[in-house]
Image (cartoon, helix red, strand yellow):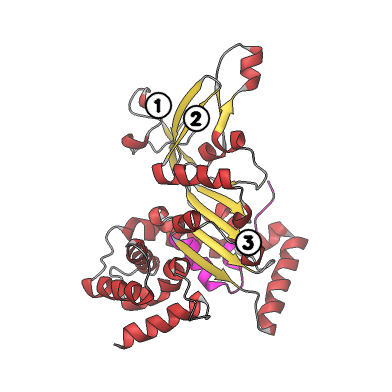
Amino acid sequence: MPLAFPFSAITGQTEMKLGILIAAVDPAIGGVLILGDRGSGKSTAVRALAALLPKMKAVVDCRYGCDPADEAALCTDCRARKRPLKAHLAAVPVVDLPLGATEDRVVGALDLEKALTQGVKAFETGLLAKAHRGFLYIDEVNLLEDHLVDLLLDVAQSGENVVEREGLSVRHPARFVLVGTGNPEEGELRPQLLDRFGLSVEVRTPSTLPERVEVVRRRDLFDRDPAAFTERWAKDEVRIRKRILVAREKFAEVTVPDAVLEMAAKLCMALGTDGLRGELTLMRAARAAASLDGQSTASMDDLKRVAPLALRHRLRRNPLDDSGSTARIERAVAEVFAA
């Protein structure tokens, strides 16, 4: 398997890296949408995530990688096994969903080889099963076919994949963090799918000469000798991995003061976001950002830092305001915090 470009070696793109780390600490946040220019490191960052994530405990020989400590989320096969369940450390899956994937490949289907050679009906797992407890990555997510969008919305809502076809009736857990990348100039996302993402990140091509030179230099070094370059950044990768592990352990203990919650609500009201998902995401993102920094309490600074990520894609279009969503959020933050 080819080496991935190290996450810690990515130059700049602070907001994108923060969004990915928050999703790694709190998978329930709803995933990350990364939109921006072509060739700006979106796919590189997502693929770097696979090598960065700490390993997880999984039931031995379970094709869904069930968590032995979560009885309620076990698959049918694991529930039937003797206790205690045998566990091992497994890599967190980061699964690619190609644009041209068929529905059978995504949800799973009848195992034709067993059906033809053994005459038995067996289920061949799809990409959703492989992504359980991990990350499902969709490049060019704004170009995804409508029927696959509908399917993802159903599974993301329920946390379960249901397959009823060709005499098969299978249910299995499918809880994953959705990560999508794309170029907004090539098409917009359907509102229903856009709303499922917890965070939205903007990525831009580096605008300063030193940063552009550094990006090209690091990429050239990696392409010429991936092993040596990866080894050079190994200690930084270990530090980030430990940071994620500690943040996960402390996440539930991080408090969000009422003053921070009130400010989050004021900000959402000022921006006119629909429903309460904006406030909930702001709260979780601020807590995750605080835990990544080793803090026990989410602060106003944490709220300001995550506000663009949590609210950028939740704004209604204002025909009287042609400024971008990021500019609108920055203006609202300045006004609300100054009041």
State the image coordinates of residue 181 (x, y, percent, origin top left).
Answer: 59, 59
127 or 302: nearer the viewer: 127
User: Which residue is label 1 attached to?
Assistant: 76
Seen in the picture, residue 248 relative to 185 is either above or below; the reply is above
Q: Earlier in the sequence, mark 1 or mark 2?
A: 1
Mark 3 secondary-structure assignment: loop
Question: Please, which residue is most extreme toward the left here?
Answer: 258
Residue type at numbered disc 1: Thr
- Which numbered marker is on residue 6? none
Q: Could you say whether the residue bearing mark 1 is in a helix, strand or loop?
A: helix
Residue 18 coordinates in the image, percent (x, y): 48, 67
Number of callouts:
3
Q: Nearer the viewer, mark 1 or mark 2?
A: 2
Q: Residue at x 57, y 44 (%)?
A: 148
Given contact means CB atoms under 8 Å apart, are the residues at marks 1 and 2 in contact? no
Q: Identify whether 65 is placed above or below 325.
A: above
Residue 44 percent location from the top left of the image: 64, 60
What is the quadrant of residue 22 in the picture? bottom left
Sequence-first tag of 1 and 3: 1
Q: Residues within 10 Å of mark 1 (few under 14, many from 20)?
A: few
Q: Which residues are magenta?
A: 1-22
Which amino acid type corresponds to the residue marked 2 in the rendered image? Val
For residue 151, side relative to residue 118 (left or right): left
Q: Check residue 6 for magenta coloring.
A: yes
Tag 2 secondary structure: strand
- Work out how far the residue at label 3 is from the one at label 2, CA to CA, in angstroms: 30 Å
Q: Residue furthest bottom?
A: 338
- Depicted 97 relative to depicted 285: above or below: above
Residue 122 lies in the magenta-colored region: no
Q: Is residue 301 visible?
A: yes
The residue shown at (62%, 61%) is 182
Residue marked by disc 2: 163
